[in-house]
Image (cartoon, rainbow, N blue to C red):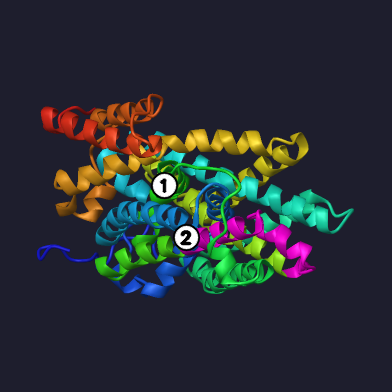
Amino acid sequence: MSNNEKPVESAPSTKPGEKRFEDFSVMPVPVEKRKSFISVAFPWGGLTLSVTAFLVGTILGGGLALSDGILAVIVGNYVLGIYALGLAILGQRKGLTMALLARRTFGMYGQILPSAVFAFVNVGFPGTYLALFGLLLASIFPGFSPYIGGLIFIVLAFILAALGIKGLSWLGYVAIPAILLLAIYGVSIVVGNLGGWDKFLSARPAGTLALGLGISTVISTWITGATTSADLGRFAKSAKSAAGAALFAFSCTALLEGLAFMLALGAGTGDLVVLLRNLGLVAPAIIIYFLLMWSSADVLIYMFSLAFTNIENAIIKKVKVGRFWWTTIGSAYAYGVGVIILSMGLMAGFRAWLSMLAQLIPPIGGIVLVDYYLFKGLKEDPLNIVSTKRRVNISAIIAWIMGVVSGWYPVLPVPILQNLLVAAAAYIVLEGVSKGKLQL
């Protein structure tokens, strides 16, 4: 933080007195409401410790040798951590969500479409999670409705998302140690079954995968999630704490991906749930699958509520619906997605569709980063950002489109990273040439 910049001491609420569930969704987080490092780091780690992270490890384990697999995990998460760190520090310095930060970059009305895309893509993943959990329960307990299982899952995710950063922290304290301990236990079983570490270290993957593609897989999977970093980083007491929380989250992800990689390499399957079930350990199988999804789903629904509270406030200049009801709407939407997946058997297709839409998000993060770090955004007062007079920044919109389109013609080995870099470069050129005048 620069010497002439201080944390936000206070800011007016949307109504007299801060609403219980608003969680500073349309105002800077006051310095007295900032949280400890642990309270920020653990919900963040809960977001990144997901089924997706576990699946990445299994993909690597199916095609890379031990040294290459570990290298892919470390390099990929290091890149993600640096990107997340930049947005986390930005969120901490201004005390603002990603959606509010985008007001300065895209304009008060220009940020509405990026924020809506950001929200709907993120909340689509809990829909797939609840469908997966419902199917898991139905397979273990014949006759149990997957729709009921999915409903139980989304209600639990809704409760913690509604409670805000406090609720997300509670789950993180439990989920992160439990997930990692169970994964470590699974690795110990595999090593024992193989006859010891010597034989495990000499294991070879069943298939082949280029190291560059392995690194690309790690980055592509979580670069969208890393774009949300300001939403949690805004609660940190210092830039150092925000950066540490970001690095903690992606270190946890790297550890889980590494453990999943070792499972896949040593056992021929990276599905920890199947592994534990085959050993007669049904309860751990349910617990780890549930925690992997729950600790991620609640944060994603929370981010949906932040984005749409921002949109509501931008359009009508008030907060009438509020974050609690946007959390309810986001949870209902996620459950609707899950019902469609379950009733039509669209799991693979829908997840592919979500992955395609996710390419729209990283360019937003790249543009916001260069706008604040290169175009004096760090010097602007947070309250002025929230109430910006800029309506639509055409430079940002054009740069966003260019970034997305560039992904259709990949040159770099990581197309989704190319999206981000092209969008950032385009914004630098457009904003620099126009001197900030290309706007409505």
Residue 155 place in picture, x, y as percent = 67, 58
| Mark 2 surroundings: few (<14), some (14-19) or many (≥20) residues within 10 A | many
State the image quarter where residue 152 is shown.
bottom right
Q: Kindly identify which residue carries mark 1.
A: 215
The correct choice, above or below, for 308 with respect to 246 in the image is: above
Give me the disc on residue 253.
2
Residue positioned most to the right: 143
- 3D distance between C-alphas at marks 1 and 2: 14 Å
Q: Eyeballing the image, is 374 above or below 293?
A: above
Q: Give residue 426's position: percent from left, percent from top.
A: 23, 30
> In what quadrant of the picture does the N terminus appear?
bottom left
Name which residue type carries label 2. Answer: Thr
Instruction: State the residue in front, 208 or 409.
Output: 208
Spot occupied by residue 327 in the image (x, y as percentages of width and height): 55, 53
**Residue 436 location, x and y as percent?**
15, 33
> Relative to residue 144, is residue 112 drawn left or right?
left
Q: Magenta stretch: give its range.
A: 255-283
Prevailing SS of the magenta stretch: helix
